[in-house]
Image (tube, rainbow, N blue to C red):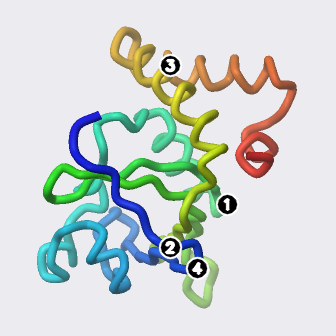
Amino acid sequence: MAGNELTFNDNEFIVSKTDTAGKITYGNELFISMSGYTEDELLHAPHNILRHPDMPASVFKMLWKRINDKEEVFAYVINKTKENDYYWVFAHVTPSFDSRGNIIGFHSVRRKPNREALSVIQPLYRSMLSAEKIGGMAAGEKKLTAALDQMKVNYDEFILSL
C-alpha cells in the first residue's frame, strides 16, 4: 500500500457531517488534521475526496443504501489523505433528520479500529476489490454475501463481532 499509515488515539473521535448529496458541512479538528486538507478545502467538498482506492465500492453502496433507508450503519473504512497517506477508521454513520423526519444530512463518528478486526477486514476487502475490478460492484457484493453466508451471520452481526 502506498503512503504512510496514520493513526490516532483510542480516546479520540473523528466527526464529520455532510448534506444529502455527500458534501462536507462540518468536520472536527481531528477530521481536518487527519485529512491533510484545510477546513476551507474540505467544506462543501464531496466526502469522497477521502476515498482510498483500496476501499471496495460495494461497501459504500451498502452504506449509502442503509443511511438513505434511515438506518444507522457501522463499517471499517480506509481513507486517503491529501498527501496520499492513509488511515483506517471504524465508522458509525447515521442520517440526520428535520422535525418532520426527513433526512437533511448525515453524521459520522469514527474511532480507532481494532487491529485484530483489521486482520479480518483487510483480506475481505482485497477479495471484494479484486472481484469488483472484474465484475463491478455486484461482484464485490457477492463476495461479501458469500463470506457472511459462510459465517452464518448478517452484516451487522459480523461487523459488531470484530
**Whole-number angstrom distance, CA of label 2 to CA of label 4:** 5 Å
Q: Quadrant of residue 16?
A: bottom left
Sequence-wise, the earlier of marks 3 and 1 is: 1
Mark 2 sits on what residue?
9
Q: Nearer the viewer, residue 60 or 21?
A: 60
Say few, some or many: other residues with alpha carbon within 10 Å of mark 3 (under 14 / 14 to 19 / 20 or more): some
Say which label, 3 or 4, has the lower sequence index.
4
Q: Amino acid at mark 4?
A: Asn
Q: Residues within 10 Å of mark 1 (few under 14, many from 20)?
A: few
- Residue pointed to by mark 3: 127
Q: Which residue is mark 1?
A: 71
Side of 5 where 93 appears, left or right: right
Of all residues shown, which one is farthest toward the right?
A: 152
Which amino acid type is shown beneath numbered disc 1? Glu
Q: Which mark is residue 96?
A: none
Residue shown at 55% from the left, 42% from the top: 62
> For the residues carrying marks 3 and 1, which lies nearer the camera in this image?
3
Q: Secondary structure at mark 2?
A: loop
Compute the Cα span from label 3 to label 1.
26 Å
Residue occupied by mark 4: 11
Q: Position of residue 5 (x, y in %)?
A: 33, 51
Compare marks 1 and 4 and give the one earlier in the sequence.
4
Disc 1 and disc 2: Cα gap in Å?
Answer: 28 Å
Q: Nearer the viewer, residue 75 or 13?
A: 13
Circles 2 and 4: CB atoms closer than 8 Å: yes
Q: Tell me which label, 1 or 2, sits earlier in the chain.
A: 2
Cα–Cα span, label 3 and label 4: 31 Å
Residue at 37%, 73% in the rendered image: 19
